[in-house]
Image (spheres, rainbow, N blue to C red):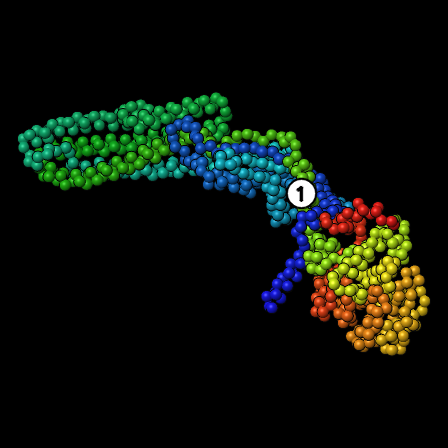
Amino acid sequence: MISDKHSTEADAADSLLPSLDLTAIIADFRRFSRFFAVIFGIVFLLIIVPVLMQVPLYTATASVMMDPRTINTTSDQDVLSGLPADSTTIDTEVEILKSNALGDRVLRSLQLDQDPEFNGYLKPRTKFFGLIKSAPDNRRLTPLEMQARHEDVLGAVLGGLSVARSGETRIITISYTSTSPEKSAKIANEWARLYLSQQLETKFQATKEANDWLNSRLGDLRTQVEAAETAVQQYKIAHNLMAVSADNTLGQQQITTLDQQLAGVKVDRAESEARLAVAKRQLTTGSSGEDVGEALNSDVIKNLRAQRTSVSQRLADLQSRYGNKHPDIIKAQDQLNDIDAQIRAEIQRIMSNLEAQAEVQRQRTASLAGSVAQARGALASNNAASVKLNELQRNADAVSSLYQSYLDRFKQTSSQEGIDRSDARIVSNASLPTGPSAPKIPISMALAFIGALGAATGSVLVRRALDSGLTTATDVETILRQPHLGNIADLASTLNRGQKATPAQYVVDKPLSVFSEGFRIMRAALIYSRIGHEVKVIAVTSSLPGEGKTTTAVCLARVMALSGQSVVVVDCDLRRRSINQYITGPVEGGLLEVLAGKADINSVLIKDDLTNVQYLPLVESAYTPKDVFGSEAMDQLLDRLRASFDVVILDTAPVLAVVDTRILARKADVVAMLVRWRKTQRKAAQASLELLNETGAHVCGVVLTQVNVKEQAKYGYGDSGYYYDQYKKYYQE
């Protein structure tokens, strides 16, 4: 029992959902063709009109490539190494191209803040949708306001920029969109140029800072070299560290060796003193240092002198081409001065060494000549002191090697200045666009068409989903699960333009019309609705007022009467008493008077002169709150009418409005439920049918009333109204 109830509820819920039948959907689109066209046109215009009103935009594109290859004019290593060509690095450079710093450089370079396209403050101010224009704001601005305006202009400039990596390559495209094709190409090229310039400036600054640091470091290292070499010499002098035999005993051979050494030392002393004297004499006479270097036989001075020659030549070449204030001449002059200073320092260092060596020679000579006897002790002490000497010598060698490496690096960075190159290069400059990049009219038209089509289709589907009315026989059978008894046309939809008529009169005047045919179809369906049972009492009802119950009852009665049947129409709507409008004379008695025993039925029946239909009306002032339809008197009256007439039609009240019809319906042989075409809510009709079924009434089916036959032709295949255009001429209107 419970499962059956749930199944019924599920079926009812499913019945509320719109059908997904393709033919029904096609029919709905035919029915809503005007609505579809209106929505389509509105949406299409809303999309395409703003596009057509847009100012044309032009896009120019320049391309740069991150080039990991280097052009080595020297074998020197760059101070600032080149960028690797990996994806992370390229993505980083893309962000640099998008940066505010680079955008600001482009803005200032091209003076874009003076262009109204980017500086909206230069445009005339407008009010009331552009109807009133005033001069631009030229008042004096505060620093904060100037900064804010500059940021706004910069944002506008960056708004037209598009930077992207081209696939998986090392090429970066720089696209700029502007209202002018010339301007877009100019800005794109300037953006690429300033990007490369920024890279070069970064490398130049790094090289300059490296040279400055190396120059300062060389002075410190030079002092350290001199101190380390002096310490070695002084230690040798202090400990008499001369060449000794591997043997610790002083034999005659050792003494002889010492004598030989003494002689050699004297010769060396004389040579050192001579070299020292020559160098001093040359320096005293004001020599430039070139001949001094020859006298001292210094490789370092030779190398520095060779560097000086190269720099001097370059300086002379630059002076022949440029003025003395040229940066390259100044830089070359500084290099020349620095080399001269190094030469002087090296000469001074060598002079110091020569003096130290001469002093050592004198000391050694004195020592060897003074006391050969002390050679044994000196030799023994030398073995212990050599350890410290080696340490000092290693320190001196290390400092000298470090000094030489810094000197070489300084020469490398000095020669590198002016030949740095960027890590990217321009692949292609931006050219003038041949046409606007936006708006793209064909694409916009296509998108507008698709959007309008989608919006119109969606609107139709939504309207269809929200359409809670019943339209076709299929709706009646699938949603209400009731037989379809026929369609009663809306008389106005069947008439020619300007033609007027009333339904009750029209079925008499035009019995072969499509309007009259609806009642004949309904009559046949009612008669054969209960096979094996005689159908004499027919209750005509609906869910709500205004669905055509009285009109349908009267017209059905007249059609039946014209076919030869005796028919009586009983007005059972105590509140409306609608039958009275079809009665020409006064109504002095009616249903309530008969039920109350105050009048005989034959005295209150009113005959229709055109069709002989009998009417049992309600008096205008007659109303009772009593349950007259459930009384025994009502049963007796119906039995009497059954015996007197072929057909008894009960014009009842709406089912949902009052309870009278639920009581009366079970007394009728069949109940015809009227549903107004496209107007009556599905839920209302279902609720009415459930109430009637609960009372035990025999609902034989549903009749669609006030059907617009012309509009009905737009609904689904299979419904008789669909073929109205083909068979309408068959009827006599």
Give the residue drawn at x 90%, y 74%.
Answer: 600
> Residue 682: which quarter of the image?
bottom right
Question: Tag count in the figure?
Answer: 1
SS for dot 1 = helix
Would residue 250 be seen by someone viewing this image from the given angle? yes
For label 1, the crowd category at 10 Å Cα-Cα, with few meaning under 14, some 14 to 19 and many 20 or more, is some
Could you tell me if residue 127 is visible in this image? no
Q: Residue furthest right?
A: 585
Closest to the observer, 304 or 541 = 541
- Residue at image location 82% in from the left, 71% down from the top: 638
Relative to 709, is 174 on the left or the right?
left
Q: In the image, is residue 279 above or below residue 94? A: above
Residue 608's spot in the image, x, y percent? Answer: 91, 63
Given the current orientation, which residue lies at the most extreme front position? 532
**77, 733: nearer the viewer:** 733
Residue 679 horizontal/vertical position (percent) = 76, 58
The residue wearing badge 1 is: 450
Residue 522 sits in which quadrant? Answer: bottom right
Left/right placement of residue 452 relative to residue 417 reads right
Would you say 165 lies left or right of 358 here? right
Task: Determine the residue positioned at 29% across, 33% down.
Answer: 349
Frontmost residue, 12 versus 602: 602
Q: Position of residue 727 (x, y in %)?
A: 81, 46
Amino acid type at mark 1: Ile
Quadrant placement of the N terminus: bottom right
Front position in the image: 383 or 703: 703
Q: Quadrant of residue 351?
A: top left
Q: Position of residue 196 (x, y in %)?
A: 51, 34
The residue lying at 46 percent from left, 41 percent from top is: 88
Q: Is residue 625 left or right of residue 695?
A: right
